[in-house]
Amino acid sequence: MEEVNEFRIPIEPSDWITKSRIQSFRFCKRQYLYFAVVQIPFTASHIMISGRKFHYFSSRFYRLVDVKEKPTFKYYRSLLPNDPDVNKLYDNFATFEVQRMESLLTQKLDPAIFFLPIVNEVSVKVTDQQMSGHVDRVWLMKDVQKLDAVIMEIKSGGIASKTSLRREGCFYQYLISQTELKEYIGVIPSYIGVYSPRNNEYWFEKVSKRSMNALFETLDELVYLQLKWAKESKINEKLINNEPLTEEETKIFDEIWPKNEYADCTMCPYERQCWL
C-alpha cells in the first residue's frame, strides 16, 4: 500500500487543459468536475503503477540501446529490468522493437534516425492558451519518400476507443504545432499512433480534419461549462468541503455537470465521491 501511495496522481492547475482532462470530460462530465475543478485527489491503481514503471524503463531503453547491435530479443530484453509485475509488458515491448528494427533494416532506413525516437517522454506547454501535455514518443518516418513523423501514445492498459485516441493524437499535434518542438522535429507530425505492450497491439493513422474539428468542439464545450460553473462558486465550495447541497443547488449541479448514464462507474476513481 505504501508503494501505491507514492504514485499519487498529480493535480494540475484547475484552469489548464490537458489530455487527461479531455479524456475525463469525454468519459463523464461529472468525473471531469471532480478531477479538474474540485480536484479531489485519488490514489493510483496497480495498473497505473505498472504503467508508470513501463513508461520510465521503456524510455530509458532508447538511451541504452546500440542500434549497430544485431536486433535480438535477448539483447533488447537485457536492457529492461526484471520485475514480476511488469515483465509481460517488457517481453512484448522487446519483441515489438526487434520487429520494428528488422523492418527498418529491410527498408534500408537508418536506425539512428528512424528507430530512435526524436521525442522521448517530453512535457509540452502552451502557456498563453493554458494547455499542456506529455508526449510519449515521436518517431520520424518516410511517407512516399517525404519525411514525416508519428506521435506515439504508449497505452500500458490496452487500446481503448479509437475515437478517443484520435482526439488525443489531435491534441498532441496541436500542442506541437504551437511550440518550438515542431522546429526540433523538423515537421508537424501528420500521423498519430498507439502501442499497447499489454496486448502487443499497434495502430496508427493520419490525422484527419474531422477528428481535429471534433477535438475543438469538445474544447469549446469544456470551456463553456467551466465559465458557467465559475458563477457557482458557493456550490463548488460546498463540494470541496463535502457539504450537502440544497434542492436548488442540486438542480443547478445536475444541469451543468450531468452524470453519464452510459459510463461504467466501476472504472471511475470517483465512484464513491459521486454521491449525487
Image (spheres, rainbow, N blue to C red):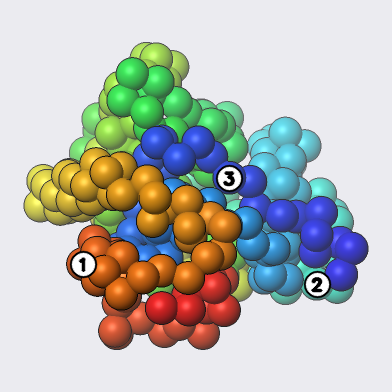
Q: Label 1 sits on what residue type? A: Glu
Q: Which residue is mark 1?
A: 255
Q: Is residue 32 above or below residue 118?
A: below
Residue at image point 26% right, 69% down: 248
Mark 1, secondary structure of its residue:
helix
Q: Are marks 1 and 3 in contact (CB under 8 Å)?
A: no
Residue at image point 10% right, 52% down: 210
Q: Which residue is mark 3?
A: 11
Q: Quadrant of the image for the N terminus?
A: bottom right
Residue at image point 41% right, 69% down: 245
Q: Label 2 sits on what residue type? A: Asp
Sort mark 3 into few (<14), some (14-19) or many (20+) by Cα contacts within 10 Å: few
Q: Label 3 sits on what residue type? A: Ile
Of 138 and 19, nearer the camera is 19
Residue 162 in sight here: no
Q: How many marks?
A: 3
Question: Where residue 29 appears, x then y in whole percent?
Answer: 32, 64
